[in-house]
Image: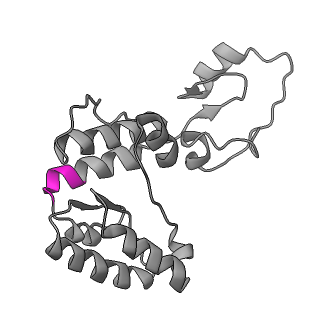
């Protein structure tokens, strides 16, 4: 979603998955990209490789006045940030609520609040944490009654699948469909 949002907004993105950083050449490329970045956006995990990334980010942050936003589930990594806690918490809210609109608005928010760009953004949109999805509609339903009002089943029996929210919120539903 972040890559799509960057494409739509005309922003250049260099992104790496944690599992790819375990390869020395990829880690080196990642760290090298920090040297010319206008902004460093991190979502660390508990993988040991993040110790090396943190060290590089701290070094670059002290050498250059580049904004660093580190967010995610483990708030201890938020201390890698050199922007206000309000900015980090807001970026985290965009991420937690998820979805393409939140990804796009997160980038606009950071652009305006951190980089001083002339951008308009919407606050984080709270998406459903659970609900009922059907591939024939572009919305999710909050409860069974709401769903049945829309669906009006012709048969008495239905089959439901449980799946992770991230599939729905990220639009990655091919396997579900």
Residue 128 can be seen, yes or no: no
Above or below, comparing residue 97 to residue 123 in the picture: below
* Residue 67 position by quadrant: bottom left
Above or below, comparing residue 46 to residue 105 in the picture: below
Classify residue 77 as left or right of residue 27. left
Above or below, comparing residue 16 to residue 32 in the picture: above
Residue 1: in magenta span: no
Residue 87: in magenta span: yes
* Residue 117 position by quadrant: top left
Above or below, comparing residue 59 to residue 17 in the picture: below
Q: Residue at x 36, y 33 (%)?
A: 125
Q: Which contiguous range is marked in magenta?
A: 83-88
Classify residue 14 as left or right of residue 131. left
Q: Residue at x 53, y 82 (%)?
A: 25
Q: Residue at x 44, y 43 (%)?
A: 6
**Residue lying at the far front of the rendered structure:** 36
Classify residue 113 as left or right of residue 38. left
Q: Where's the C terminus, which quadrant?
A: top right
Q: Position of residue 135 (x, y in %)?
A: 72, 29
């Amino acid at each position: 979603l972040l890559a799509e949002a960057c494409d739509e907004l005309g922003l250049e993105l260099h992104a790496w998955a944690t599992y790819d950083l375990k390869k020395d050449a990829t880690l080196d490329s990642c760290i090298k990209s920090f040297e010319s970045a206008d902004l460093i956006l991190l979502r660390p995990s508990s993988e040991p490789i993040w110790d090396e990334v943190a060290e590089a980010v701290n070094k670059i942050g002290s050498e250059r006045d580049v904004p660093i936003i580190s967010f995610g589930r483990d708030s201890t990594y938020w201390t890698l940030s050199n922007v206000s806690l309000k900015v980090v918490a807001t970026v985290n809210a965009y991420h937690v609520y998820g979805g393409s609109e939140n990804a796009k608005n997160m980038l606009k928010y950071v652009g305006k609040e951190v980089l001083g760009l002339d951008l308009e953004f919407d606050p984080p949109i709270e998406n459903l944490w659970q609900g009922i999805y059907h591939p024939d509609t572009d919305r999710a339903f909050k409860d069974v009654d709401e769903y049945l009002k829309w669906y009006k089943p012709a048969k008495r029996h239905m089959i439901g699948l449980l799946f992770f929210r991230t599939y729905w919120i990220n639009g990655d539903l091919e396997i579900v469909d």
